Image: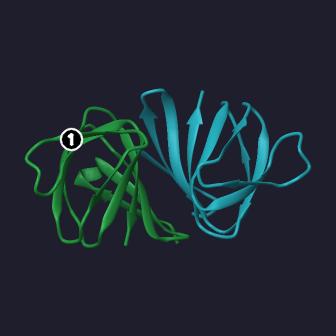
Chain colours: A green, B cyan
């Protein structure tokens, strides 16, 4: 089962699946700024494009480019913003 | 615009977008064997999981793991098979 999800009126779309290591999603984010909440620990890796993230406990926007990743604990919220379509891999644990 | 596509009755799903370098899709392939055709040159990179591909001009199945890629010219057909959900990035030119 490959689960298609849409958020923010289709500005973020993702495909959920089971990887060898656990639950994963791949997705694409349109230009804009978004706030996400986590229910599990997430590792987010930029596949193509780039985005800025404001991570929990950090007042500054930090830039993440293709191949770079950040982690978020469960039950946190964080913001991302991008000026171009950006694809990501999100791994949950 | 993020384009959701489904193939083989939903066994392959993809999200199409514009990367800084050109048209791209990210997608997930369910367990099974599939034949694809190309209309453009494609570079296919395995994000998670692994698959075997039978590429044009090759009678043997070749295995591609996470982080590995292969290229296919335009107007070719190739087969892939996998025994677990596998995610990929496809770049077109």
* Relative vertical location of residue A10 with respect to residue B81 in this rendering, above or below: above
Secondary structure at numbered mark 1:
strand
In the image, A76 versus A87, the foreground residue is A76
**In this picture, residue B53 sits left or right of residue A43:** right
Tell me which chain the residue with mark 1 is part of: A
Q: Residue furthest left?
A: A59
| Residue at image location 59% in from the left, 66% down from the top | B85
Residue that numbered label 1 is attached to: A62
The answer to whether any part of residue B64 appears in the image is: yes
What is the x, y in percent for residue B26?
Answer: 51, 48
Give the residue drawn at x 67%, y 30%. Answer: B41
Residue B45 % position (x, y): 60, 45
Figure quadrant of residue A87 = top left
Determine crowd level at label 1: few under 14, some 14-19, many 20+ residues with C-alpha closer than 10 A: few
**Residue A41 percent across, percent down from the top left:** 30, 69
User: From what the image shows, is residue B44 above or below residue A84?
Assistant: below
The quarter of the image holding the C terminus of chain A is bottom left
Residue B1 shows in this picture? no
In x, y percent, where is residue A19?
A: 52, 68
In-front residue for pair A46/A83: A46
Extreme residue in the right direction? B59
A48 and B37: which is toward the camera = A48
- Quadrant position of residue B43: top right
Would you place residue A64 above or below residue A24 in this image?
Answer: above
How many numbered marks does the figure carry?
1
Residue B35 shown left or right of residue B3 in the figure: right
């Amino acid at each position: 089962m490959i689960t298609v999800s849409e958020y923010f009126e289709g500005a973020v779309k993702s495909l959920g699946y089971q990887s060898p290591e656990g639950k994963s999603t791949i997705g694409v984010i349109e230009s804009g700024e978004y706030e996400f909440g986590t229910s599990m620990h997430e590792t987010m890796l930029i596949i193509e494009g780039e985005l800025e993230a404001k991570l929990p406990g950090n007042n500054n926007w930090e830039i993440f480019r293709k191949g770079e990743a950040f982690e978020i604990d469960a039950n946190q919220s964080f913001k991302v913003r991008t000026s171009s379509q950006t694809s990501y891999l999100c791994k949950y644990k």
